[in-house]
Image: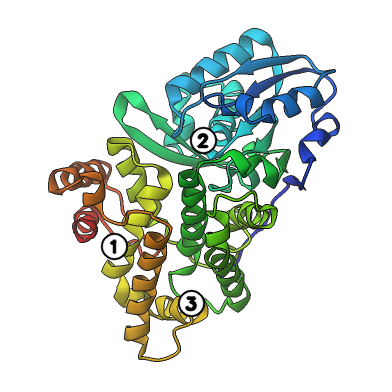
């Protein structure tokens, strides 16, 4: 097991009616900026719950944060926060709204000339950030319980992640009932997103971390077991609660303690989103099987473990089980109607070439073994066509 430091200060308030506790969670002094997306929270009742809980606060609103939040939109929020003298940010939405709010929190306190440096330096230039809290409406990214954010820049077709403890939410409110109005596609994305987050920390190589392995297997197995009920279209509280908690657990740092992580799938997937507009989970479902197939020689022990412990494969050699681990994962994605090929999105060799050129320009090297360069990204993506 590798050395590690685990730190997660997020207060999680979970359950029915939890939004009503915002009055106790949000600071009583100072103006609050409420940030949200396209306005769905005004249709499903969440906005009303939030504003009623904050009736004695001075609130300024910023709406219109898009999926895959853009730098350009975030900077408008930064300007409004400065103009209005906001002192606390409250993100109400899914991972995109939460990620945007983390960037806005950092940019509001940034003393440099170009806030994009926050992202380019992976958060290294952050010294402080405006405090923030979250009300989660779409379980998927785990942003409610970590200090990670992913921001896109429209002018350059870039999508990059940053991380810094200063942008941990002070609290996150998780009420599974707010997911009842979500379309099946968004729930599907949430299931796949959480599953892939776990796999990025699990399908690498063994460092004698049986507890972390079993924690990852528990999250993955729960998602698989409950996927049918989550996507049934029913207002099934238990199903939505399990999705919400699995998604938070998948990327709150616990399963990453002491293990080696991959994240090649995410880095490649970000470029597919930046260039072609795929949803985050859609890009992961396409790329992850290709990464596993390409790296099967290095990952086969953990792929075999996945086959045994999540998919119930009891017979066969390590190589056979490793292949079964890939095949059954693809079958799971397809069972929840998630496409798994680039061609499903009309992306072919020319699209692959664009992504490869981007990685070549940056000199990027990916994977737990740092053995995936731009040329190998191309080989992986050609497996995904």
- Residue at 28%, 36% (x, y): give it: 275
Residue count near mark 1 (Cα–Cα under 10 Å), binned few <14, some 14–19, many ≥20: many
Disc nearest the viewer among 3 and 1: 1
Q: How is the image coloured?
A: rainbow
Placement of 98 over or under 266, stated as above or below: above
Which residue is more in the foreground, 206 or 185? 185
- Residue at 60%, 51% (x, y): give it: 234
Q: Earlier in the sequence, mark 1 or mark 2?
A: 2
Q: Is residue 175 left or right of residue 23?
A: left
Percent position of residue 270, x then y? 36, 44
Which residue is more in the foreground, 73 or 138? 138
Name the residue that disc number 2 marks: 96
Percent position of residue 341, x then y? 26, 55
Name the residue that disc number 3 marks: 206
- Residue at 45%, 89% (x, y): give it: 314
Q: Secondary structure at mark 2?
A: helix
Name the residue that disc number 1 marks: 290
The residue positioned farthest toward the top in the image shown: 83
Q: Secondary structure at mark 1?
A: helix
Q: Secondary structure at mark 3?
A: loop
Q: Earlier in the sequence, mark 3 or mark 1?
A: 3
Residue count near mark 2 (Cα–Cα under 10 Å), binned few <14, some 14–19, many ≥20: many
Placement of 379 over or under 269, stated as above or below: below
Percent position of residue 253, x then y? 61, 56
């Amino acid at each position: 097991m590798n050395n590690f430091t685990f730190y997660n200060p997020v207060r999680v308030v979970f359950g029915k009616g939890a939004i009503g506790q915002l009055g106790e969670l949000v600071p009583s002094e100072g103006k609050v900026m409420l940030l949200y997306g396209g306005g769905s929270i005004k249709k499903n009742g969440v906005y009303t719950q939030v504003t009623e809980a904050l009736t004695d606060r001075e609130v300024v609103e910023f709406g219109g944060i898009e999926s895959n939040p853009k730098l350009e939109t975030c900077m408008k929020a930064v300007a409004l926060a400065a103009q209005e003298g906001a002192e606390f940010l409250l993100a109400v939405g899914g991972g995109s709204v939460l990620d945007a709010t983390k960037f806005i929190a950092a940019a509001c306190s940034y003393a440099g000339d170009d806030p994009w440096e926050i992202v380019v330096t992976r958060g290294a230039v952050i010294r402080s950030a405006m405090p923030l809290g979250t009300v989660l409406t779409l379980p998927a990214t785990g942003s409610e319980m970590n200090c990670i954010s992913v921001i896109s820049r429209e002018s350059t077709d870039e999508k990059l992640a940053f991380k810094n403890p200063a942008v941990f939410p002070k609290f996150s409110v998780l009420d599974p009932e707010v997911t009842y109005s979500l379309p099946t596609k968004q729930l599907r994305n949430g299931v796949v997103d959480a599953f892939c987050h776990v796999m990025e920390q699990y399908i690498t190589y063994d460092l004698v971390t049986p507890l972390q392995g079993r924690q990852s297997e528990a999250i993955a197995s729960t998602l698989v077991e409950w996927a049918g009920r989550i996507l049934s279209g029913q207002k099934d509280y238990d199903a939505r609660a399990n999705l919400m908690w699995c998604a938070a657990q998948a990327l709150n740092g616990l399963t990453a303690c002491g293990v080696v992580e991959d994240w090649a799938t995410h880095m490649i997937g970000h470029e597919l989103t930046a260039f072609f507009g795929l949803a985050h989970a859609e890009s992961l479902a396409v790329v992850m099987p290709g990464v596993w197939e390409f790296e099967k020689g290095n990952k086969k022990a953990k792929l075999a473990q996945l086959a045994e412990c999540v998919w119930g494969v009891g017979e066969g050699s390590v190589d056979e089980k490793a292949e079964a681990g890939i095949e059954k994962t693809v079958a799971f994605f397809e069972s929840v109607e998630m496409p798994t090929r680039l061609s499903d999105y009309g992306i072919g060799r020319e699209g692959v070439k664009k992504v490869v050129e981007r990685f070549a320009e940056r000199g990027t090297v990916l994977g737990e073994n740092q053995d995936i360069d731009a040329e190998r990204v191309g080989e992986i993506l050609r497996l995904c066509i």
